[in-house]
Structure formats: structure tokens, C-alpha cells
Image (cartoon, rainbow, N blue to C red):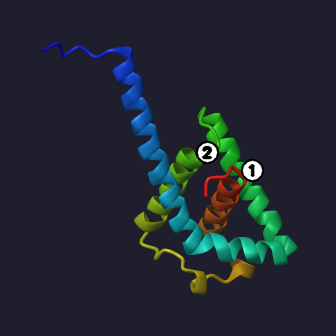
Amino acid sequence: MNNERTPAMDASFDAAYLATAELDARHYLDQVMAMVGVDGLVEALAQPFLLAKVDQHAAAVRESLTAAGKPVDSISLAGYARSVIAVHQRHGRPLPTPDSVDWAAADWTVLRLVAVCHLADAAGAF
């Protein structure tokens, strides 16, 4: 039996991997959206100062991904959100929940995650 990989096999593997990665990313972004995104975006639409903060964070996320040569898509955004949450947890802080956030004084982590949700929504990642 010939164990050599062909370009067709590589393309098939790549397509399957990307499809799985895309599904995993969308699932993770759904979780982030449930954690803070829905309430954060609703609050941002009701409070112009909060919308301005979310927009600034969204610009910073977009700039960070672009500088790393990554597209603003579900896979990159989910990876970015994972990193933000990992650092937050590494500092021993509990993850935010919709009822634990004071939107008038939302911290950096919450604003960054809401910004990721905003970009994911705009990119059609849900």
C-alpha cells in the first residue's frame, strides 16, 4: 500500500480541519456572547459612552489581528477571546456573568470581550 500523501488528500484534510476549527470557534464565540456579549451590546446601544468604549476596543482588536496577519473571522476572534479570558483567569479573577457586570464601570476584560462579540457579529460569525 502506498502511504504517500497526495495534494488531493492534503486539500481534503485541510478542508475538514478548517470546518472543525470554524465550528469550534463559533461555539466558543456563542459562549462569550452569552457570558457578556448580548447584555454588553444591548447596554452599548443604550449608552453612547459605553458604545464609544466598545468601538475603541473593537478597533484595538481589529488592529491586533491585522498586525499579526490574521483575518477578522470567527477563528481569529475566538482565539483572541480565549487569550483574554486565559489572562483574566491567570490573575485569579472570576469570569464575568451578565448579572455581575456594572456596565457604567465595566473593566478592560469585559469591554474587550464585548468588542470581540461586536466584531464577530459584524463578520457574521454567529
Label disc, if present, on residue 74 of the rendered structure: none
The residue under label 2 is which amino acid type?
Answer: Asp
Q: Residues within 10 Å of mark 2 (few under 14, many from 20)?
A: some
Residue at the far right: name it.
48
Q: Earlier in the sequence, mark 1 or mark 2?
A: 1
Identify the residue position indicated by label 1 in the image.
59
Q: Which quarter of the image is occupied by the N terminus?
A: top left
- The answer to whether any part of residue 60 appears in the image is yes
Residue 51: give x, y in percent of width and height: 81, 67
Identify the residue position indicated by label 2 in the image.
73
Residue at the far left: name it.
1
Q: Residue at x 72, y 54 (%)?
A: 58
Placement of 92 over or under 76, stated as above or below: below
Placement of 52 over or under 15, stated as above or below: below
Q: Residue at x 67, y 52 (%)?
A: 124
Tell me which corner region of the image, top left, top right, bottom left or bottom right, holds residue 81.
bottom right
